[in-house]
Image (cartoon, rainbow, N blue to C red):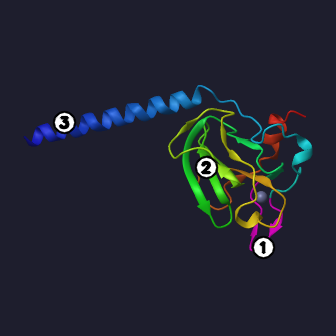
């Protein structure tokens, strides 16, 4: 009896491991990256907004300005690991990408995806807005890229090179 339980545990973990490996392989099979705001160009974001001072913290990302309601597209294929409302970010979506980085989309007017959903690159996940601490600024997408390993304050990277590469010019 005890032995049977041990074996079923083993089978469970093997299946879990295989499923995770398959999932990661699937995500990594399409590692394209795109501009997360529909039709945005280099004029819609600053070349240096990463690290600029904000009240109580430094700015950890890029602000891409667009009309309220403009589609926000997933910059990468991945899994939605969080969607909901945060104090600073307002309505936000967090996607784990093929490169084990987290892609953060904030100040959305509406969220158009669900938790644990597998998003395709370019899939609409929301609309540009000014929720959270962007209430008194023009509508924009706050876009951050954060490394999972090591996960600590300061593990954000500057999204500008990413955006410049993805930009339609
Ligand atoms: Zn911002």
Camera-side mark, 2 or 3: 2
Residue behind mark 3 = 7
Residue behind mark 2 = 94
Q: Which residues are magenta?
A: 51-62
Helix, strand or loop under label 3:
helix
Q: Earlier in the sequence, mark 1 or mark 2?
A: 1
- Alpha carbons under labels 2 and 3: distance apart: 37 Å
Helix, strand or loop under label 2:
strand
**Residue lying farthest to the bottom in this orientation:** 56
Image height of 57 relative to 13, above or below: below
Left of 132 or right of it: where is 51?
right
Q: Residue at image x 60%, y 45%? A: 95
Q: Residue at image x 68%, y 61%? A: 89
Residue 91 lies, in percent from the top left, at 65, 57
Residue 70 lies, in percent from the top left, at 78, 44
Helix, strand or loop under label 1:
loop
Label 3 Cα crowd, 10 Å radius (few <14 / some 14-19 / many 20+):
few
């Amino acid at each position: 009896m005890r032995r049977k339980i041990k074996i079923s545990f083993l089978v469970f973990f093997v299946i879990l491991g295989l499923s995770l490996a398959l999932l990661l392989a699937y995500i990594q099979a399409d590692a394209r990256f795109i501009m997360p705001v529909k039709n945005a160009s280099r004029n819609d974001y600053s070349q240096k907004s990463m690290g600029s001072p904000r009240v109580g913290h430094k700015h950890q990302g890029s602000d891409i300005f667009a009309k309220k309601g403009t589609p926000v597209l997933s910059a990468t294929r991945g899994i939605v690991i969080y969607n909901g409302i945060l104090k600073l970010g307002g309505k936000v979506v967090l996607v784990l990408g093929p490169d084990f980085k987290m892609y953060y989309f904030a100040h959305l007017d509406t969220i158009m995806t669900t938790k644990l959903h597998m998003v395709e690159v370019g899939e609409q996940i929301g609309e540009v807005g000014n929720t959270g601490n962007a209430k008194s600024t023009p509508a924009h997408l706050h876009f951050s890229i954060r490394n999972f390993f090591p996960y600590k304050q300061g593990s954000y990277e500057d999204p500008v090179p990413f955006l410049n590469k993805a930009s339609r010019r």
